[in-house]
Image: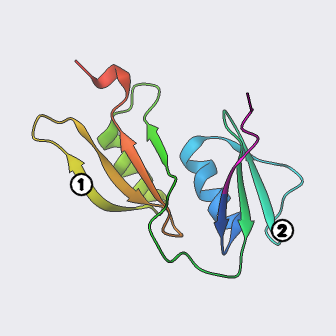
Amino acid sequence: MIDVHFVTFDCAQPYELATFWSKATGWEIHPDDGKEDDEVLLQGKLNLLFIRVPEGKSVKNRLHLDVTGSDGTTRDQEVERLVGLGAVVHEERRDPDDKGWVVMLDPEGNEFCVCRAAYEKS
């Protein structure tokens, strides 16, 4: 068996991307990490590590995060909130019966999906 230590994002601006995800999740950036660092750690239920790399993103992610609202927020409320933080809607995958998800891009173009929370399903 293994433990997952970090989920790592290659990126151009680690601190800025970690800040977006901090606002999205409510998790804290490690207190020793700053704006000029090449590696920035976001500590939460799962540790997200943002590492500066020279090359830009060129293809679809092979791994992505699926997220849901919490504390009673709906999928649609979360999509709106995340757009306000700098994400963009990439692809609508909602069905006419309101099931499905929304594919979004974070500020550096990494795909992630916003799904309905378990409490939304009836």
| Residue span colored magenta | 1-8
Q: Residue at x 29, y 24 (%)?
A: 120
Label 2, label 1: how far apart the Cα atoms are: 35 Å
In the rendering, at what x and y percent does residue 69 appear? Answer: 43, 34
Q: Mark 2 points at which residue?
A: 37
Q: Sort mark 1 into few (<14), some (14-19) or many (20+) by Cα contacts within 10 Å.
A: few
User: Per the image, is 60 magenta?
Assistant: no
Q: In screen coordinates, is 98 left or right of 25?
A: left
Q: What residue type is labelled 2?
A: Asp
* Quadrant assignment, res 97: top left
Q: What element carries label 2?
A: loop
Q: Which amino acid does label 1 sit on?
A: Glu
Q: In this view, does 38 lie above or below 9?
A: below
The numbered mark, 2 or 1, whose residue comes first in the sequence reads 2
Q: Residue at x 33, y 38 (%)?
A: 75
User: Per the image, is 2 magenta?
Assistant: yes
In the rendering, at what x and y percent does residue 71 appear? Answer: 46, 25
Q: Which residue lies furthest to the left in this view?
A: 96
Q: Sort mark 2 into few (<14), some (14-19) or many (20+) by Cα contacts within 10 Å.
A: some
Q: Residue at x 35, y 20 (%)?
A: 119
Q: Which of 59 and 80 is in front in this view?
A: 59
In the rendering, at what x and y percent does residue 37 appear? Answer: 83, 68
Q: Quadrant of the C terminus?
A: top left
* Quadrant assignment, res 116: top left
Dot in front, 2 or 1:
1
Instruction: Name the main secondary structure of what is drawn in magenta.
Output: loop
Looking at the rendered structure, which numbered label has been put on residue 66?
A: none
Q: Is mark 1 on a helix, strand or loop?
A: strand
Q: Which residue is drawn at 46% across and 40% down?
A: 67
Q: Name the residue under label 1.
A: 92
